[in-house]
Amino acid sequence: MLGRMYEGQDCSVARALEVVGDRWTLLILRDLSFGLKRFDEFQQSLGIAPNVLTDRLKRLDQEGLVKRVRYQETPERFEYRQTKKALELQPVIFFLAKWGDRYRPDPLGPPRLSLHDNCGGKVNEKLVCSRCKKDVWFDSIYTEANPTHAKVK
Amino acid sequence: MLGRMYEGQDCSVARALEVVGDRWTLLILRDLSFGLKRFDEFQQSLGIAPNVLTDRLKRLDQEGLVKRVRYQETPERFEYRQTKKALELQPVIFFLAKWGDRYRPDPLGPPRLSLHDNCGGKVNEKLVCSRCKKDVWFDSIYTEANPTHAKVK
């Protein structure tokens, strides 16, 4: 969706980046994984220009990463839901977040926690739950704002 | 290294993308993980303009993702080696490749295979070795060009 910039590239990474190798796109996918669904929610979260957001959502729809669903008739309004194709990028977003936590740390700790849906324990970058010590796969991880950040606001 | 584009963003993903949210940067990191080290190797692999490559390598060096090591004195020549900080992005590259393999498939199969260093088996997107059936972590994965692609060239 970003054009074939890598004509000579015989590589799946390059092909994946043609679809999602745009930072706004990855941040929209992140927001979708946090549960955001509506245009104004994305706009508020991202501080993105409306025309850019419209463009990125349209491309995500064309690529089958989001499904546009009408939730109101008058006036007509739509929300965006991520598809399986988008969900399968969760590992990419998870590891980008873990890397950011480590190498661009926030003094208040990670802004968002990755938690194990079974027990609520924190999932570390080795995909192990700190509470129940089990191995955790991405479909069992949810995220939540870190309370240390909420206190400040 | 790409500038603070997300001033309002309280998010580790956004912060990680400030460093590596540039497609060339991710492709250079991919090449490093394939064992490429020299300027002309990257240039040949990526078909990238020399000034852009110089810029990205300089930024990767400044950010501590590569170490510049002199390998020849006259004329002076340097090679680039990835640091631990870069290695910890391997999961991101691995899952981008798996996603590209699935959603932008190549008729000849995946251009590159992720293999288990213990037995040479293929590692699937669930991080399980297809040969020995063991769970595999990223530090036990190496990649190799898929022979199906080599035959054609």
Image: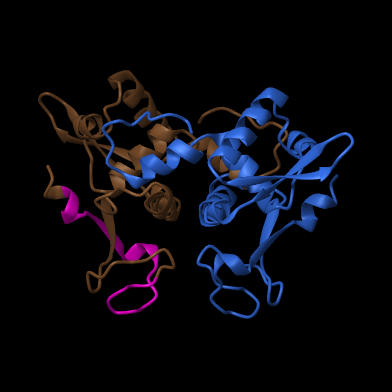
Chain colours: A brown, B blue
Q: Residue at x 25, y 70 (%)?
A: A121
- Whole-percent x and y of residue A65? 40, 42
What residue lies at 63% left-to-right and 80% top-to-bottom? B132
Indicate the position of residue A68 as horizontal and vertical percent values.
29, 36
Please give the name of the residue rendered at 73% of the width and 30% of the height, measured from the top-left corner: B47
Q: Image height check: is B141 above or below A27?
A: below
Specify whether residue A58 is painted magenta: no
Residue B53 lies left or right of residue B5; in this view the side is right
Q: Is residue B40 visible?
A: yes
In this orientation, which residue lies closer to the viewer: B119 or A130? A130
Q: Residue A142 in the image: x percent, y percent?
A: 27, 59
Percent x, y of residue B119 = 70, 77
Q: Is residue B151 left or right of residue A130?
A: right
Which quadrant of the structure image shows residue A147? bottom left
Residue A78 against residue A147 in the figure, above or below = above
Front-lying residue, B1 or B67:
B67
Asked if residue A65 shows in the view, the reply is no
- At a point 70% along the width and 29% down the height, the residue shown is B48
Quadrant (top left/top right/bottom left/bottom right) for the C terminus of chain B:
top right
Magenta region: which residues? A128-149
